[in-house]
Image (tube, rainbow, N blue to C red):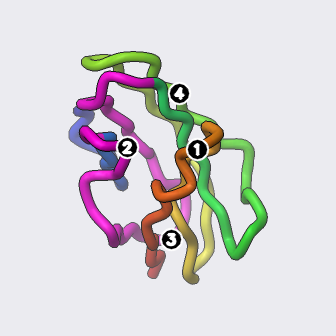
Amino acid sequence: MPADAGLVVKAVASIRWDATEYTATAGDIKVFLANDDSVKHVLVIRQGDKVVGDLELAVTKKGTVDEGTINLEAGAYSVYCIVPGHGGMNSSLTVS
């Protein structure tokens, strides 16, 4: 995990994120995704039902990682998995 990561998310067994709520600091946020689950996940950031920015992190199997940067203003967002059937992977993200 990079020391400068502003948001660290782990996919864990039974198709869920490791937390129901995350926080980050507004501006350029380095997002780090690790897969502790055995199936593929694709992380996006949403505001309401709309994907924001062009960040799309994919982890294909257990042990894989991905990272990227997204610029977010202060507000309420969600960390969401766009893989069909993974709609329960929808955690809140508060950016301040």
Q: Mark 2 or mark 4: name the one nearer the start of the chain.
A: 2
Whether pointer 2 and pointer 1 mark residues with C-beta atoms closer than 8 Å, the reply is yes
For label 4, the residue is 58
Give SS at disc 1: loop
Foreground residue, 41 or 71? 41
Q: Mark 3 or mark 2: name the one nearer the start of the chain.
A: 2
- Three-letter residue code for mark 3: Ala
Q: Nearer the viewer, mark 1 or mark 4?
A: 1
Give SS at disc 4: strand
For label 2, the residue is 15
Per the model, the C-alpha gap separating discs 3 and 4 is 23 Å
Question: Which residues are the magenta region?
Answer: 12-39
Identify the residue at image location x=25%, y=38%: 13
For label 1, the residue is 85
Foreground residue, 81 or 77? 81
Identify the residue at image location x=41%, y=70%: 25
